[in-house]
């Protein structure tokens, strides 16, 4: 039998709602493990922790579990632990069992005691277990040294009401809130660098995120669609099941290009995408829209143009990258594994019909007057009927 303790931090600050957040985190862990590995396990909440008991675990399965847990939002860190009784001698023995094959010159014992009825304080436990380890090392003919700051090896002890646990390592998680605890949103996902990072930040705040991609087939090659499918698959590791809506905008885009002033086309495209996304979001009960826009990064992202674009949607428009520069965004894309896919060359929707000199400071009245002259409703409905939906686990 193998044991895991999973810890969280932000959830612990949720007061009376804490139990609800814990329940969602437990369900997310349970679903992801059942999808990705074939092991028998039980999961329960104990003393501000989540405790996993796993039977017949192989080394390669252990590594898979590590990878899965490191991508579940809400987890601060986790540890593979040895279970001990509430007996100080047994605790000392289990610590020695973990330590004895390790190579080190300095060590420390660190105890966390949620069970305040335990007969020894944390400091006394550290002293007694430390003395036991010290003596065992001397018996092996070595000269150990206790060091409280930056030791070569640290052995952790946690004591709760029923058991104690000992371990040597805390594996970092990605923190945040459990996905699904903050409602659901629809993110505009292009084949570029920014939008997958924006989606990642939505997920980090507990928002279950599905995606919509606007493509220009048959006027472009299907490369952008394949890229977005790959990006959606990568993002799926952070949540349980997500959808990708593939919307054919090429015919509408061509119509706009033929019937509107060139310099305003980009804004007209973006407003239309936001309007369509809002329509789908309302029908599917999404609460907000996410985009990867950042102030001043391209012509359509000046404050004036963002204001014009914003007016096209009556839903909350969230832009988590709004104050980031490209270098910051790239670092996150590299971290989450989307960067290498995003930089693959492709002919996207905007580049197919993009104007050479787009307007940077458009006025809403001007754009609305152009839109009023366009007959788009039938084209939009025709495209809505052709939307494809792909699902990822």
Image: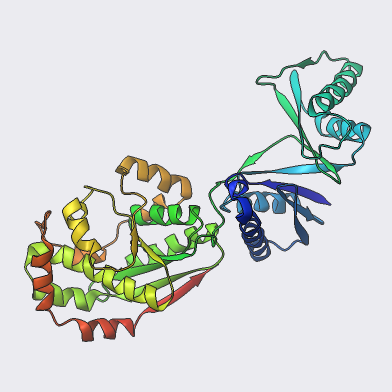
In percent of width and height, residue 287 lies at 41, 67
Nearer to me, 251 or 378:
378
Q: At 41% across and 48% down in the image, what residue appears?
A: 333
Q: Quadrant of residue 185?
A: bottom left
Residue 217 visible in the current orientation: yes
Against 61, is 160 above or below?
A: above
Residue 104 visible in the current orientation: no
In percent of width and height, residue 347 lies at 26, 63
Q: Quadrant of residue 83?
A: top right
Nearer to me, 283 or 225:
283
Tell whether 344 sits left or right of 367: right
Against 314, is 62 above or below?
A: above
Q: At 81% across and 42% down in the image, what residue appears?
A: 160
As drawn, the residue found furthest toward the top would be 143
Count of marks overlaid on the render: 0
In percent of width and height, residue 380 lies at 25, 81
As drawn, the residue found furthest toward the left would be 261
Against 74, is 127 above or below?
A: above
Q: Which quadrant, please, contains the C terminus?
A: bottom right
Q: At 47% across and 49% down in the image, what residue appears?
A: 336
In percent of width and height, residue 32 lies at 63, 61
Color style of the picture: rainbow
Tell whether 67 sits left or right of 168: left
Q: At 85% across and 44% down in the image, what residue appears?
A: 163
Nearer to me, 182 or 31:
182
Tell whether 122 sits left or right of 171: right
Tell whether 302 sits left or right of 21: left
Against 128, is 318 above or below?
A: below
């Amino acid at each position: 039998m193998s044991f895991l303790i999973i810890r969280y931090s932000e959830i612990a600050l949720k007061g009376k709602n804490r139990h609800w957040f814990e329940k969602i985190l437990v369900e997310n862990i349970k679903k992801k493990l059942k999808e990705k590995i074939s092991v028998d396990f039980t999961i329960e909440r104990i003393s501000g922790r989540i405790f996993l008991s796993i039977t017949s675990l192989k080394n390669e399965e252990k590594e898979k579990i590590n990878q899965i847990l490191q991508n579940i939002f809400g987890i601060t860190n986790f540890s593979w632990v040895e279970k001990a009784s509430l007996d100080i001698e047994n605790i000392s023995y289990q610590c020695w069992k973990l330590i004895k094959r390790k190579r080190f010159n300095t060590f420390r014992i660190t105890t966390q005691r949620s069970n305040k009825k335990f007969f020894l304080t944390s400091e006394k436990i550290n002293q007694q277990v430390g003395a036991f380890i010290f003596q065992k090392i001397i018996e092996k003919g070595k000269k150990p040294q206790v060091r409280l700051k930056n030791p070569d090896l640290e052995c952790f002890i946690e004591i709760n009401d029923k058991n104690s646990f000992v371990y040597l390592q805390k594996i970092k998680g990605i923190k945040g809130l459990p996905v699904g605890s903050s409602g659901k949103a629809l993110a505009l996902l292009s084949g570029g660098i920014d939008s997958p990072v924006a989606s990642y930040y939505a997920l980090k705040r507990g928002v279950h995120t599905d995606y919509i991609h606007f493509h220009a087939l048959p006027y472009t090659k299907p490369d952008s669609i394949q890229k977005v499918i790959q990006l959606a698959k990568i993002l799926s590791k952070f949540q349980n099941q997500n959808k990708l809506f593939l919307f054919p905008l090429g015919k509408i885009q061509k119509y706009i290009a033929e019937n509107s002033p060139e310099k305003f086309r980009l804004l007209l495209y973006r407003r239309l995408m936001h309007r369509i996304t809002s329509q789908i979001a309302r029908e599917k009960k999404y609460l907000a829209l996410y985009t990867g826009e950042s102030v001043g990064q391209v012509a359509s992202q000046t404050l004036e143009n963002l204001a014009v674009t914003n007016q096209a949607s009556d839903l909350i428009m969230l832009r988590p990258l709004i104050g980031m520069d490209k270098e910051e965004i790239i670092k996150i894309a590299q971290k989450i594994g989307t960067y290498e896919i995003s930089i693959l060359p492709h002919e996207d929707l905007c580049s197919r019909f993009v104007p050479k000199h787009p307007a940077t400071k458009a006025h809403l009245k001007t754009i609305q007057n152009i839109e009023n002259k366009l007959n788009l409703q039938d084209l939009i409905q025709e495209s809505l009927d052709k939307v494809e939906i792909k699902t990822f686990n």
